[in-house]
Amino acid sequence: MSNNNNCKTEVLLATASNIEKCANLLKNGDVVGMPTETVYGLACNALDETAIAKIFEVKGRPQDNPLIVHVASFEQVIPLVKTIPSITKTLADKFWGGPLTMIFEKSDIVPYSVTAGLDSVAIRIPAHPIAINLINQAGVPIAAPSANTSGKPSPTSAIHVLDDLAGKIPAILEGGECEYGLESTVIKIDDDSNITLLRPGAVTVEMLQEVVPNVSIDAGILEEINAVEYVISPGMKYLHYSPKTNVVVIDSNLEQFVDFIKKQADKSVGALVFTGEESKISVPSVSYGKESDHLLQAKMLFKALRAVDDLNVQTIYARLPKKNGVGLAIYNRLIKAAGFEIITLK
Ligand code: TXA
Ligand code: MG
C-alpha cells in the first residue's frame, strides 16, 4: 500500500495461501487486520518503525498510547525483554495462549515507537490459531492494537474492521466472530507476589488471585470521573468505545431503570439493556446478553455499541453489569463508552 486512504481492502478467507499472503505483507512493512480470540487486531512487524507509524496513522491513534506485541511462543518473548520474573512463567503456563497481556522491561530491539517512549513492553500470546499461524509465518513479533478507528468500539468481526478501515489497509483475514469480544486483561508485575491490573478482561481478578497472592486494581479502572493524572496504562485515559450517540450509564436495578426510562420517553432516547428486558422498556433498545451471563455480555457489547447508532436517538441509557468476574471488564468498557457519565439511582 499504502498508507494512503485509497487502497483496496480485501477480506480474505484464512486459507493457507491467504495467510502466507498476509505474512508477506507484514514482512514488507504493511499492516493487515488479524482475528484474535479477544478482538480483531491491526497487525504489523513490531520491529519495523515505518510499519508502526502506519498503525498510528491508520487508526488515528494518539502517539502516547503504546501497542501490545504478539508472539507465538514463550521463547519468542526472551529477545524482547530484559528480565523474566518467575511469576510471569507461571502466569504464561496458565493463561497463554489467551486473553492476558503482561508488561515487561523492554530490551533494546523493541523500538520506542511501539512502547510510546516507555521502557516497558506489553506482550501476549493469543489463542487464535489464525493469529498464531500468521505470527509464525511472518517470523517476527507482531504489534497489534485493536483494529478500530481510535475511540470507536473494538471490532469483534471482520466487517467491523472493514467499516472502520476500508481503503486504509490492504487486507483483513476473516476469522469469524471473536470468542471473547473484549480486549485482553493487561497486568503489570510488581514482584512475584504482587501484580497490578491495568485493564480488566476475560482473565479475571479472581482467576489471577488463584496464582498471585496480591492483585491490586489500578485506580483508573473503577474511577467514575476521568482521572487522567494517575493512569499508568496510557490507553485507559482516552474516551473509548464510543458510538456517535451519547451514552449514559444508569447504576440501578431493573425496576428503577424502567421507571427512569418512562420519565424520559418523550425525549430522543434509547436503551442498552440486558437480553429479555426489551419488552419492559418503552423506548427503542439494543440488548447485550442476559444479566447473569457476563461472558455473553462480553461477546455482544461492542457489536451492541456499534448498533445503538442505528436507533437514531440522541441519548442511550445503559444498564450496568455487576463488577464481579468478567463483569468488571464490561463495567469498565461501558463507563468509558459513556465518557464516565453515570447516574446512580440506588
Ligand atoms: O486483546 C487485545 O489486547 C487486543 C488484541 C488485538 O490483542 N489488542 C488491544 O490493543 O486491545 P490496544 O492497543 O487497543 O490496547 C492496548 C492497551 C492500551 O490500553 C495500552 O495503553 C496498554 O495496552 N499498554 C500497551 N503497552 C503498555 C505498557 N508498556 N505499559 C502499560 N500499558 C500498556
Ligand atoms: Mg484498542
Image (cartoon, grey):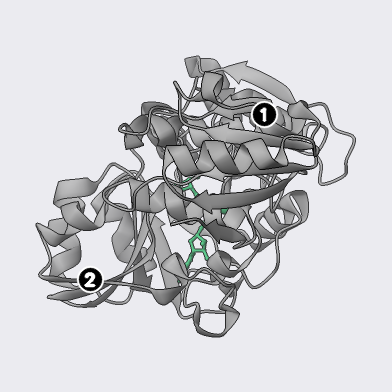
Left or right: residue 47 versus residue 205 is right
Q: Residue furthest bottom?
A: 229
Rendered location of residue 134, percent (x, y): 46, 33
Residue 176: image tag: none
Distance (Cα) linking label 1 and label 2 = 42 Å
Say which residue appears at 37% left-offset and 56% top-offset.
200
Disc 1 + disc 2, Cβ < 8 Å: no
Note whether residue 171 is visible.
Answer: no
Q: Is residue 95 above or below residue 40?
A: below
Query: As rendered, which of 242 and 274 lies closer to the eye?
Result: 274
Please state the horizontal and vertical placement of residue 14, each as a whole percent of the image: 51, 18
Residue on which the image places disc 1: 307
Mark nearer the N terminus (1 vs 2)? 2
Indicate which disc residue 84 carries: 2
Residue at x 48%, y 17% (from the top left corner): 16
Crowdedness near tag 2: few (<14), some (14–19) or many (≥20) residues, C-alpha within 10 Å: few
Disc 2 marks a residue whose amino acid type is Ile
In the image, what residue type sits under mark 1? Ala
- Callout 2 secondary element: loop
Kindly identify the residue that appears in the image at 62 percent across and 18 percent down.
12
In the picture, residue 297 is in which quadrant? Answer: top left
* Between marks 1 and 2 in the image, the one whose residue lies nearer the viewer: 1
Say which quadrant the C terminus sits in: bottom left
- Left or right of 167: which side holds 262? left
Q: Secondary structure at mark 1?
A: helix
In percent of the image, x 26 and y 48: which residue is there? 325
